Image (cartoon, grey):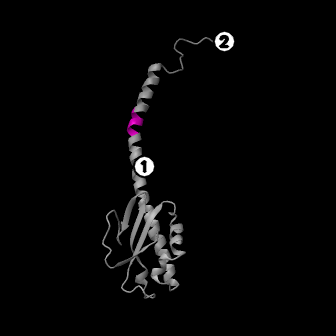
Amino acid sequence: MMKRLKKGDNKGFTLVELIVVLVILAILAAILVPALLGYIDRAKGQQIVLNARSCYTATQAEMSSMYAKSQAVSDIVNAPHPQTILDTADVDDVCTGLKVGVKSTDASVKTNHANYKVAYVEYTENGQTIYFDGASWVETAPSTSGIITYKIK
């Protein structure tokens, strides 16, 4: 037997209720989408800093390895060092330019650990270049006086 529905026993939504919900969702989307896009743009801007920092760390690790093997600082540009740096930093596919620099009074002295400390990095990716000036990452080129630079890529 079929039961008859009572007049006040409607269990569905009215058209007005559905439209109100859709309007609220549209307003929320209009507010949230620009905010989310802003977060994405800022994250992309920070990606270059993360990649550059990875290059700095990889270069410092390679320099420490060279110091332990009593290799000259200038050997950083000879194979396999540049590729090792890019592979360790995992930026070979996005990095378009990398220069590193060390403060050195005499680059031929292989026993001076200060000669092997990275003091300058110039990192380029997607046409944007950032620099490590020995203390922080900046967008304007710092002075390189007293710094010997080596082109890695």
Left or right for 48, reference 85: left
The vertical placement of 42 against 103, above or below, is above
> Mark 1 — residue?
40
Which residue matches tag 2? 2
Between the residue at mark 1 and the residue at mark 2, the CA separation in whole angstroms equals 57 Å
Q: Earlier in the sequence, mark 1 or mark 2?
A: 2
Whole-percent x, y for residue 68 in the image: 51, 84
Q: Badge 2 local density, few (<14 within 10 Å), some, or many (20+)?
A: few
Q: Relative to residue 32, is residue 151 depicted above or below?
A: below
Of helix, strand and loop, which one carries label 1? helix
Q: In the picture, which quadrant includes the N terminus?
A: top right
Pointer 1 with pointer 2, Cβ within 8 A: no
Query: Could you classify mark 1 by the number of other residues whose Cα lies within 10 Å: few (under 14), some (14-19), or many (20 or more)?
Result: few
User: Which mark identifies residue 48?
Assistant: none
User: What is the three-letter code of the residue carrying label 2?
Assistant: Met
Q: Which residues are magenta?
A: 27-32
Q: Is residue 103 above or below residue 137?
A: below
- The answer to whether residue 10 is magenta is no
Amino acid carrying label 1: it is Ile
Q: Quadrant of residue 20?
A: top left
Q: Residue 128: give x, y in percent of width and height.
A: 39, 59
Quarter of the view holding residue 111:
bottom left
Q: Magenta stretch mostly in which secondary structure?
A: helix
Residue 152 place in picture, x, y as percent:
46, 71
